[in-house]
Image (cartoon, helix red, strand yellow):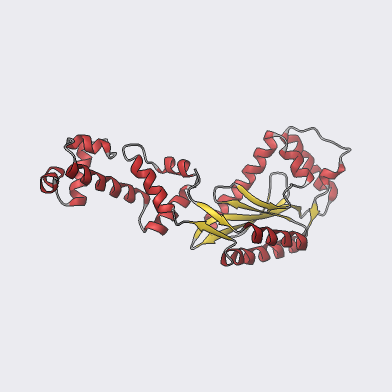
Amino acid sequence: MDQISLILNKDLLLSFFRNFHTLTGIKIALFSESGKEILSYPDEHCPFCNYIRSTINGKNDCEISNEKSFRRCQKTKKIEIFHCHAGLTETTAPLIDNGVVIGYIMFGQITDNPDKESLQRSLSEAIARSGREHRETDASIYNIVYKSNEQIHATAKILEACTLYVLLSNMISLRNENFVKNLNQFLLSHLSEDLSVRRLTEEFNISKNKLYDSTSKYMSIGIAEHIKNLRIEEAKRLLAETDLQIHQIADQVGFADYNYFCRIFKKEVGLPAKKYRNANMK
């Protein structure tokens, strides 16, 4: 389930990516906040990356390398220039909407190594780690676009500026209008169950930071506090509208410890559960 998702103007975004590639000769791609590739230009990887990604080990290495850059961008909220597991140069720019990282634009599959022999050794070692055979005769897999450090940093600066343009032009925006509704629907349907942060991140396919940031941004309250409030409100409803015993209500709204429920209920409502029922029973 991906309830917190991106709205894309794919035609404008693809046109932007195509122009970027025409100008630089470099592949560019958009990733969601969870690290899923959404759009790229060109669609295909360079011959080397295609070759190494054809094995499980090679593909895993590529994804781990990307994920590390995403985590660093999530933490610093700054553009990240790095070398992937195979030694190629990659650049990741975070897309930031009101302080929240909602995705990433990455360009790469290039090299800053002008020494072709050194580069070939590095690529061959990565191929060996992936489990693929070394193909001496297929020179195309070693044809990596070369850019100097100066060119890479200049391109990174341009991309950094372009991320702002992409957001301001509404090529990419956060689908947030249903966030509270979707989250509450899930929580209210599962109040009696485990509603840990880990479960919610798995259910909504988002990171912990994204969950914390989004609940704070769109509900002005932390997720734990929000869940507690929902449980208390449901307990109040059940006390007023049903004849369930109080310990049954506590269990039904997700408080396994009856005494803890009684303490929290009195603290939040101002009355013990029994007195609240007597005063509000319909």
Determine whether, in the image, residue 59 is placed left or right of residue 116. left
Image quarter of residue 173: bottom right
Q: Quadrant of residue 52?
A: top right
Q: State the quadrant of the C terminus.
A: top left
Q: Residue at x 78, y 43 (%)?
A: 48
- Residue under the point 25% across and 48% down: 233
Question: Is there any visible trace of residue 99 in the rendered image?
Answer: yes
- The one nearer the camera, 103 or 245, is 245
The mark total stands at 0
User: Left or right: where does residue 18 sit relative to residue 276?
Assistant: right
> In the current view of this chain or complex, which residue is farthest to the right?
137
In the picture, measured across the screen, residue 124 lies left or right of residue 171, that is right
Nearest the viewer among 9 and 154 is: 9
Residue 115 at x, y = what percent?
Answer: 83, 52
Along the line of sight, which residue is nearer the eye, 90 or 38?
38
Residue 75 percent location from the top left of the image:
52, 54
Q: How far across and how far down the image is residue 249, in percent?
A: 22, 38
In the figure, 184 relative to 176: above or below?
above
Q: Residue 281: horizontal and vertical position, in percent?
A: 13, 45
- Residue 91 makes an appearance in the image: no
Q: Residue at x 74, y 52 (%)?
A: 42
Q: Is residue 123 left or right of residue 80?
A: right
Residue under the image location 74 percent in, 60 percent down: 149
Taking 43 as reference, is 250 above or below it?
above
